[in-house]
Image (cartoon, coloured by chain):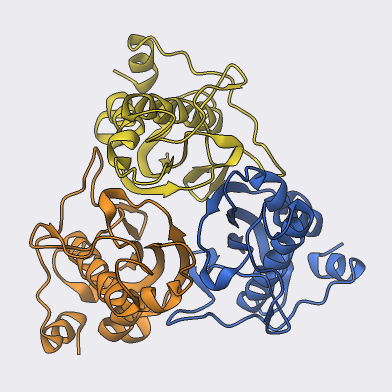
Chain colours: A orange, B yellow, C blue
Amino acid sequence: MTPNEKLKEMGIVLPEPPAGVGAYVPWIQTGNLVITSGQLPWKDGVMAFGGKCGSDFGIPDGYQAAKLCAINALAQISQAVDGDLSCVKQIVRVEGFVHTAPGFRGHPDVLNGASEFFNHVFGDAGIHARVALGIDEMPLNAAVQIVVWVEVA
Amino acid sequence: MTPNEKLKEMGIVLPEPPAGVGAYVPWIQTGNLVITSGQLPWKDGVMAFGGKCGSDFGIPDGYQAAKLCAINALAQISQAVDGDLSCVKQIVRVEGFVHTAPGFRGHPDVLNGASEFFNHVFGDAGIHARVALGIDEMPLNAAVQIVVWVEVA
Amino acid sequence: MTPNEKLKEMGIVLPEPPAGVGAYVPWIQTGNLVITSGQLPWKDGVMAFGGKCGSDFGIPDGYQAAKLCAINALAQISQAVDGDLSCVKQIVRVEGFVHTAPGFRGHPDVLNGASEFFNHVFGDAGIHARVALGIDEMPLNAAVQIVVWVEVA
C-alpha cells in the first residue's frame, strides 16, 4: 500500500498546508532533504490545541496535538513532492517541542502522537530519529511544535 | 546586485566573526552545507541585548537583537566562503531562540529581525525554513540566539 | 592513534547503546550524515544525572552529565559504523540542552563536558559547531540532553 493509500485507509485528508507566521517559507529542500519549518497544531485556520501540557491539558490531548502537527507537516511535505508521498524515501528526523507546565516530564508520550503517525503511514520508511524538548513559552501558545526532515527520491 | 553590494548599500559592515564561548568552532561545513554555531547578539565584544523578551525589553528591541545575531551569523558565513557571499546559493534554515519572560508569545515578530535581514540581502536565495522557540534560560543571558544553515556553491 | 585506541587509553568502554524512550530509533543515516536522537545521561539503565543545573547540581556535575550523554551518543555512532570509529570523518554538530533552574547561565561550561570529550577522542575530526539552550522541563528530568551529527566515510 502506498502512503497516499494508507492515508485514505486511515480516513485522513491532508489539509491545505498552513502558511508560516513570519518572513519564512513552510518547507525547503537542500540536496535530497526536505525540512519543514516549525509546524503548529492548526486545524481549519484555528489553533486547535493551545496551552501547556501538565496544566491546561494532559498527555492524551498532547498526543492528539502532536499528531495534528505531524499531519500539517505531511501536508507541507506532500507539496514538496507534488502530492506523491511514495517519493518520500525516509522520514529522517522529528524535532519535537512540547509546551510544558512546571514539572511535566511526559514529553515522549506526547510526541509519540507524531512518531506513531509517521510509522503507521510510511512503515519502515517512517522510522526516524527524534529529539524531545520542553518549551516554557511557545509561539502563539501552541501546545506542541514539530519539525520534520524527510529524504526524498 | 550581489549580496556584498547589497550589504554596502544597507550601510552594514560585517564585524570580525565572534568567537564561540566554549570548546567548539563558530561554523562547520559538511558537504555543501555550512552550519553556524549558536550566534548571540554580540556587538564590539559586548552582549548588546541581554535579558528576557516580555519583561526586560519588547518586540522592537527583540527584532534588533535577532537582526544583530543574523549579522554575526553572516560574518561567520562570509568567512566560510572567503568573503564572497555570492557563493551562498540558499539560506536554508534559521533556528530561532527567544529568551522569553512568562507569557511572551511574540516569537515570530522578534525572529523576523533575522529573517527579513536575510531576505533583504539575498533576495530569493534568502528564503528559508524556520523554527521558533522560547527559551527560559539563555546562555550568558542573551536576548536571542540563532543558528543559520546555508547551502554554498 | 585511532579513536578506538584513544578511548581505550582513556579507560572508556562504550556501553550498550541506550534504547530510545518512544516510537523512534536512536540514530539514523541520511547520505553520509549520521544523526543521533536526543541522548540522556543514562548509565547502566539508570538516569545518572537528574534535576536542574543551578539548583539540584552545579557546573561540575553538569559537565559530567554532558560527558555521559556524549559517551552514550558515541555508543550509538559506533553502532552506525559497525564499531570502527575511524569511519567518523568529522563530528559535525552538537546540539546541547541543559535542564536549567531559574537564573542559570553557565550552559557553555556544562556542554564543554561533551565537546571536550569529542575533541579529545577524535582530535581535528572532533571539532564541531554547537548550539546551547536552557530547557525548563526536560524529558524524564534528565540533567542534560545532547544530539550529535557526524559525517561518516
Instruction: Specify the quadrant of the image occupied by residue B152.
Output: top left
Q: Is residue B149 visible?
A: no
Q: Is residue B62 left or right of residue B138?
A: left
Query: Which quarter of the image is occupied by the N terminus of chain C?
Result: bottom right
Q: Is residue C104 above or below residue A50?
A: above
Query: Which quarter of the image is occupied by the C terminus of chain C?
Result: bottom right
Q: Is residue B96 above or below residue C122?
A: above
Q: Is residue C52 left or right of residue B1?
A: right
Where is residue A71? Give x, y as percent: 21, 70
Where is residue A15? Give x, y as percent: 10, 66
Instruction: Specify the quadrant of the image occupied by residue B79.
Output: top right
Q: Residue at x 36, y 72 (%)?
A: A91
Q: Is residue C152 above or below residue B77?
A: below
Q: Is residue C45 left or right of residue B1?
A: right
Q: Is residue A82 visible?
A: yes
Q: How many marks?
A: 0
Q: Residue at x 37, y 16 (%)?
A: B7
Q: Is residue B30 left or right of residue A58?
A: right
Please name whichever residue, B141 or A80, is drawn nearer the observer in this view of the structure.
Answer: B141
Where is residue B52? Give x, y as percent: 45, 36
Please name whichever residue, C129 or A110, is drawn nearer the observer in this view of the structure.
Answer: A110
Please name whichever residue, B55 or A87, is drawn nearer the observer in this view of the structure.
Answer: B55
Where is residue B124? Give x, y as percent: 24, 34
